[in-house]
Image: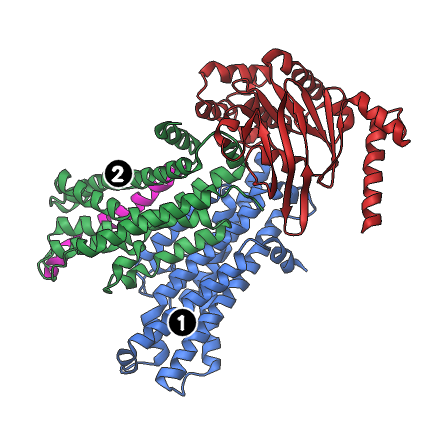
Chain colours: A blue, B red, C green
Amino acid sequence: MKIPKECQKIKRTGFLPLFVFGGLFASLVPLLNTALRTEVFIHAKSDPLNVLFDANWQMIALINVLLLTAGACLMYHIEYAGRCMEKMRALPIKESAIFSEKCVFLAITLLGVLALESVSLGFCVKHWFSSNETTVIILLKYLGCLFLLMLPAVLLALLIASLWENMWVSLGVGVIGIFVATMLPMEPSSFLSLFPFALPFQTPFAMINYKTKFISAVIIESLVIIGAEIIFLNVRRKRL
Amino acid sequence: MNMIETKNLTKSYGDFTAVDKLNLHIPKGSIYGFLGPNGAGKSTTMKMFLGLIKPSKGSFTIDGKQYPQDKIAILQNTGSLIEAPAFYGNLTGKENLEIISKILGLSQSAVAEALEITGLTPYKNRLAKNYSLGMKQRLGLAGALLGQPPLLILDEPTNGLDPVGIHEIRNLIRSLPQKFACTVLISSHLLSEIELTADTIGIINHGCLLFEGTTDELKHTALAQGYPTDHLEDIFLALIENDNEERSRIR
Amino acid sequence: MKFMTLLSIELAKIRRSKIILILFIAVVILWIPSVANAHLNFKMSFAGISPENNFLIQGLMGMAWFMFPASMVVCTVLLAETERGHNGIIKMKSLPINLTTLCLAKFVVLLLLAASEMALTMLTYFISASIASHLQNYDFLLPVSFVLKEIFFLLLSAIPMLAVFWLLSTCIQTPIFCVGTGLASIVPSILLINTKIWFLYPMAYPFYVVATEYAKLSTSMTESNLNFFLWLPIAISITLVSLWLSCRYFEQTERS
């Protein structure tokens, strides 16, 4: 019953169309890239998906992170702009519950976007590489990896969005966060690659090769961000 | 001499007609009470006078000036408060008024005067977003009164005010035509509100003008049509009810 | 109503918006890695670029590729939301103002914000180059006139992009679509600067200009001069058409 409530709130805000268009836009990247550079790609001596991820994922991930930051800002903007948050505070619902509902909703929406992108990558493999090794199971496994890597970014974007009532401030801070991520070293071995906004730029191969490192980073970061949100909400409530 | 005259003024949104062939006559130097239930078309009409909405059909003149040709000249001489007060939340009350005053080319003293008239002087340096509902309404009113314009368009100006505030603002509006020689168009859904301030009344329902005239003329009309005439409130309700019934019969 | 008065009003409206602070944080973050990795500038000899030139250009590339366009999208949100927040725009439209002038005044505010960000970039460059010089025992500081020229050119090349962002914010009423489209439009610029049709995509201009400067300053790269003959008329047309359209959209006072 709880998820549809968030779904209702974002009606007519352009949230879902943006994610659909954003997802389609990101899915176009590997299609166009492979269509234009077919020869280079199919002669690469590596697993087709590996080639495609190396060639496209940085750009796709950037679109994804931008989408989730804009989406998170909007989800809180609709609460603050019409002073709905004040109404919510007067209802028997915890603010932390609102945060978690938003997290679940944003994560599910992004899962949809990631699924679209995976389909596009799968299509590229089937169409241009004619590889039999890439199966739906593998694609689903990779999708799971990408989703996991995305979670701390979802939480952080929503934490930032909840901190400021003015959308441009949260968007500005989110954009700075993404900028920091684009400047950090992306090698999976690097500690800095664990920055929440940098994690979505990692490929499933990096995740599989450094499984323990990334999974523990995702869990620890998620817990820290959730903890930070709870502390922030408590402090704000006391200051009201 | 009329300050505002409309001729078959109409506003439609698709197949919904918000204002239907409205013919208003607002005398110069008077207070005109524009009365109607919520959603009757009062705000839409007022927005058309301010050029915030384009009329679908018909025309209107304000002080002999035609819309849309003389839009800027009309706005130069009109102070307005439409629906909820509009302001910049990140600015103080005084700063908000300074913006309007700069646009109207007024002196600094006009801002102080408007703040004083509306009782906002003690709160002038507070951010507008932190104002109470009543203070926001007063700020909107101060913005309308800036520079003592010859025409004031006030959409439910006492919304959100406490009884003392309502009394104060009502007295202020009442005194405006004498003080500043201006015409006031004031809307409300409460007849008791209008009864105490307005010289002329216009009653609107579903976008159509049901009555226009003085309170005495309203009583005469009510008597002629067999409506209760003890209280003006009852006349107003009877007029609206009767109109609603007729509409449902036609449908 | 004089344009300058309207501009001063528009500037007053963004008081207490914290936007300069956000822009400042963005530029500080831009230069921190440059200072921390200042030693890497000495390893760029293979590209034939001097360490001090590399220090400046790498920073400007980071700025032009993402941070500058993205922060300008944020600024358009600020300008739009300031008006929409408490219906300020309704009051504005009921005052005797020419809406085209108002729209242009707002665009000039956007230009001034872009210029402020560039000024902050320059200021923080000199501070970070001084720190890097001290740390590496090498003079990274370039002449003020040279830095000013580079930054001014970057700002100038961004005007068509700013006009397009302004158009997006006036014609798209739903804030998320406006933000999303603006931010997403930045991403393809990295691909487009390597194509022959880069000049058709205003979001790629600042990055292309800095990349061209990089090529100019390095001996190993083929110097690619900007083809003003084709670029200039297209850039001017994009700017004018975008501004004209944004004024038309802004004037549409009709509200649903």
- The residue under label 1 is which amino acid type? Pro
Q: Residue A204, labelled with which disc?
A: 1
What secondary structure is marked by label 2? helix
Q: Which residues are magenta?
A: C18-47
Q: Of A215 and A148, which appears nearest the observer? A: A148
Specify the amino acid type for callout 2: Ala
- Quadrant showing the C terminus of chain A: top right
| Left or right: B102, with C193 as reference point | right
> Which residue is pictured at 59% across the width and 42% down the height?
A82
Left or right, C55 with respect to A26, comes to: left
The numbered mark 1 sits on a residue in which chain? A
Chain on which label 2 sits: C
Residue drawn at (30%, 54%) of the image: C202
Q: Residues within 10 Å of mark 1 (few under 14, many from 20)?
A: many
Considering depth in this image, is B88 or C129 the residue closer to the camera? Answer: B88
Which of the numbered marks, if any, corresponds to residue A77? none
